[in-house]
Image (cartoon, grey):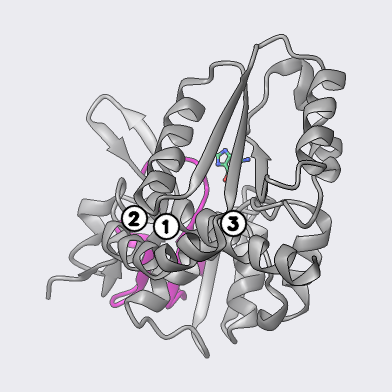
Amino acid sequence: MTPLLLDGKVASAALLDFLKPMVETLDPKLVVIQVGDDPASSSYIKQKVKSCEKVSMRSDHIHMPEDTTIDTLMQKIDELNNDADVTGFFVQLPLPDQLRGHEPEIIKAISPMKDVDGFGAYNLGKMFLSKEFEHLPPATPSGIIRLLEHFDIEIAGKHAVVIGRSNTVGKPVAIMLLNRNATVTVCHSKTSNLADIVRQADIIIAAVGQPKMITADMVKDGAVVVDVGIHRTDEGLCGDTDFDALLSKVSAISPVPGGVGPMTVASLIRNCVTAKERQMALR
Ligand code: GUN
């Protein structure tokens, strides 16, 4: 049987359609800070700005030079924290070498009210409490959940195996799945018997960062697969899973590109709407 394609273009378009009237009423503004010229970052930022345009949301792209110092970046963050017209902002990662060690302090400096990336301790902590407290959840995990929900994939009672334990995807998506009553296993580079564990999964979230690492022999018949990876190879773009080989085994799978990527961007816009609602309620 042909598996269901978890098409992120379709699901994100539905989410953006839902958000558009709210954007019109609330008029939020997103600011993206880019330091340096990482080509992947430039491309992600372009997609984010384009999606803002789709829903007629205001956005600003602040492009700082490669050799920006931590003091200059912190000043900019302070300025945006105090600018009442800015609803939300984030610093695109990865950062140039001289700033990389400062990532925790950079994330900490962003006001929790404006942390639309949801990377700060306050918003991560709220997400930890329960589904009802997920106020500004990290955009990629939130997009993954929305993708599953859009296609009516049952989460409660399922065994979800998350491969990858990053602070931005693996750990938070594991918590969000747990908040929705999945039984969750988190695997990582030191996991022994990875294939045996993945073979038990009803839902596989592949966020390893290695091209086509999840092969057909690691997947049980009828599993649902969400592929978070994106890699440029000689044969074109691919994800963390061997998509073509998995097609004959799975019941649903997200493509790369066009799966999780568009959902991340739409979730970021959703966070801008949520942030603006909260800011107006407190004013
Ligand atoms: N780099 C890749 N994805 C992201 C993201 O969602 N947020 C930030 N700040 N940087 C990223």
Please state which of the two labelled residues, at mark 1 or mark 2, is closer to the viewer. 1
Classed neighbour count for the residue bearing mark 1: other residues with Cα under 10 Å, few (<14), some (14–19), many (≥20): many
Look at the image and give the residue range highlighted in magenta: 197-225
Looking at the image, can residue 36 be seen? yes
Classed neighbour count for the residue bearing mark 2: other residues with Cα under 10 Å, few (<14), some (14–19), many (≥20): many
Q: Where is residue 38 in the image (x, y as percent from the top left)?
A: 53, 20
Q: Position of residue 149 (x, y in %)?
A: 41, 78
Location of the N terminus by quadrant is bottom left
* Residue receiving disc 3: 272
Secondary element under disc 3, as helix, strand or loop, is helix
Q: Give the prevailing secondary structure in the magenta stretch.
A: loop
User: At 52% from the left edge and 88% from the top edge, which residue is drawn?
Assistant: 156
Q: Hey, which quadrant is residue 180 in on the image?
A: bottom right
Amino acid carrying label 2: it is: Gly
* Residue receiving disc 1: 263
- Is the residue under label 2 in contact with that under label 1 (CB below 8 Å)? yes
Secondary element under disc 1, as helix, strand or loop, is helix
Q: Hey, which quadrant is residue 215 in on the image?
A: bottom left
* Residue receiving disc 2: 259
User: At 72% from the left edge and 51% from the top edge, which residue is drawn?
Assistant: 115
Q: Distance between the residues labelled 1 and 2?
A: 7 Å
Q: Where is residue 52 in the image (x, y as percent from the top left)?
A: 44, 47
111 up-or-down from 102: above or below: below
Report the residue that reaches farthest toward the bottom. Answer: 157
* Magenta stretch encompasses residue 204: yes
Amino acid carrying label 1: it is: Met
129 up-or-down from 187: above or below: below
- Residue 48 shows which numbered tag? none
